[in-house]
């Protein structure tokens, strides 16, 4: 449908700030949801191809680079007391790319006590004393060089990760998995977190653009200018 | 951890400030593209936003560096 037909049909349009040509926003709410799911997808749906591709490539690139720099560990959702991952609120702005983190957190802390496919991708770090399934405990001890099978004690029907030692006994193992990740990754944990957070936050602007078109500069106040 | 030891070793030698540059570039692109529709205008605005963001962040870094030298 052309712009004049869109106007005639009462469709919502925005004006380009550059040459004031109308932009057909189609169904803005649908476009906004699409842009949240995949950056730029809402713009593609509206037929604004160049902007859609530009947003998609730039935001997904910094999200993936951030995830890679952080060794795949920096995007996870955790709401355990004392281990709340506030950064995820920003990372979630990137949409579908961050959804596996929610799924993994829900599965690990739910009845199954193990992530999907036993994969440690976007899984929150284990805290001291956390119960997990036997299968996940075996898998972690197999794939993670910093975790030994002895780090899990029987807690039928689960296995407990690094339980607190009895009073008076010294414990030299790191308290939780997050400390190990920080030690392994050093500054890249923070850099990866920053990249993925910024990708999610910038996508808020992209969602706004899909919903209401490009932002216009504030109108000039002629009275003030005359003074 | 980054996928290979070589990549980690190479990345470890890169000064921290260099990791901020791609973020400034992407932020400038997104700011410009959400304020314009015409590709030529987006390109022009990206350069303007790069100047603003680079200038502000550079200014903050200079102030932090100077304060660090004085303390």
Image (cartoon, coloured by chain):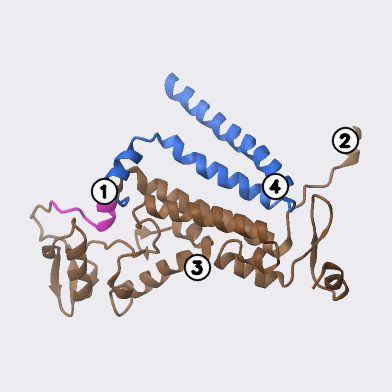
Residue A49, how many percent across, how many down? Answer: 67, 61
**Nearer mark to the viewer, of 4 and 1:** 4
Q: Give the residue pinned by disc 2.
A: A225
Q: In which quarter of the image is the C terminus of chain B?
A: top left
Q: How crowded is mark 4: few (under 14 residues within 10 Å), some or many (20 or more)?
A: many
Q: Image quadrant of residue A146?
A: bottom left
Horizontal arrangement in the rendering, residue A126 relative to residue A76 (left or right): left
Question: Are discs 2 and 3 less than 8 Å apart at CB?
Answer: no
| A103 sits left or right of A201 in the view | left
Start-end of magenta stretch: A172-181
Q: Which of marks 2 and 3 is nearer the N terminus?
A: 3
Instruction: First in sequence, mark 1 or 2: give its number.
Output: 1
- Read off the chain for label 4: B
Element on which disc 2 rests: helix
- Give the chain letter at badge 2: A
Can marks 3 and 1 be said to lie on one chain?
Answer: yes
- The chain coloured brown in the image: A
Name the residue located 65 percent from the left edge and 38 percent from the top edge.
B47
Which residue is identified by label 1? A184
């Amino acid at each position: 449908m052309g712009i004049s037909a869109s106007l005639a049909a009462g469709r919502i349009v925005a004006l380009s700030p550059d040459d004031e040509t109308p932009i057909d926003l189609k169904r803005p709410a649908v476009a906004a949801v699409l842009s949240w799911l995949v950056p730029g997808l809402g713009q593609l749906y509206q037929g604004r191809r160049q902007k859609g591709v530009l947003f998609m490539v730039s935001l997904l690139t910094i999200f993936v680079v951030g995830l890679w720099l952080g060794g795949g560990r920096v995007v996870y959702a955790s709401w355990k007391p004392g281990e709340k991952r506030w950064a995820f609120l920003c990372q979630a702005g990137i949409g579908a790319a961050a959804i596996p983190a929610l799924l993994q957190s829900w599965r690990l802390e739910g009845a199954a006590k193990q992530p999907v496919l036993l994969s440690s991708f976007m899984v929150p770090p284990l805290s001291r004393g956390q119960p997990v399934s036997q299968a996940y405990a075996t898998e972690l001890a197999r794939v993670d060089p910093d975790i030994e099978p002895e780090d899990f004690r029987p807690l039928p029907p689960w296995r407990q990760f690094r339980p607190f030692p009895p009073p008076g006994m010294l414990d030299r193992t790191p308290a939780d998995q997050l400390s190990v990740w920080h030690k392994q990754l050093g500054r890249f944990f923070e850099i990866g977190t920053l990249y993925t957070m910024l990708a999610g936050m910038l996508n808020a602007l992209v969602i706004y653009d899909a919903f209401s078109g490009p932002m216009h500069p504030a109108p000039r106040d002629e009275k003030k200018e005359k003074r | 951890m980054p996928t290979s030891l070589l990549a980690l070793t190479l990345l470890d030698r890169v000064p921290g400030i260099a990791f901020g540059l791609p973020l400034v570039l992407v932020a400038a692109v997104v700011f410009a593209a959400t304020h314009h529709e015409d590709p030529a205008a987006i390109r022009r605005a990206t350069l303007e936003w790069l100047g603003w963001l680079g200038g502000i962040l550079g200014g903050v870094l200079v102030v932090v560096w100077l304060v660090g030298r004085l303390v």
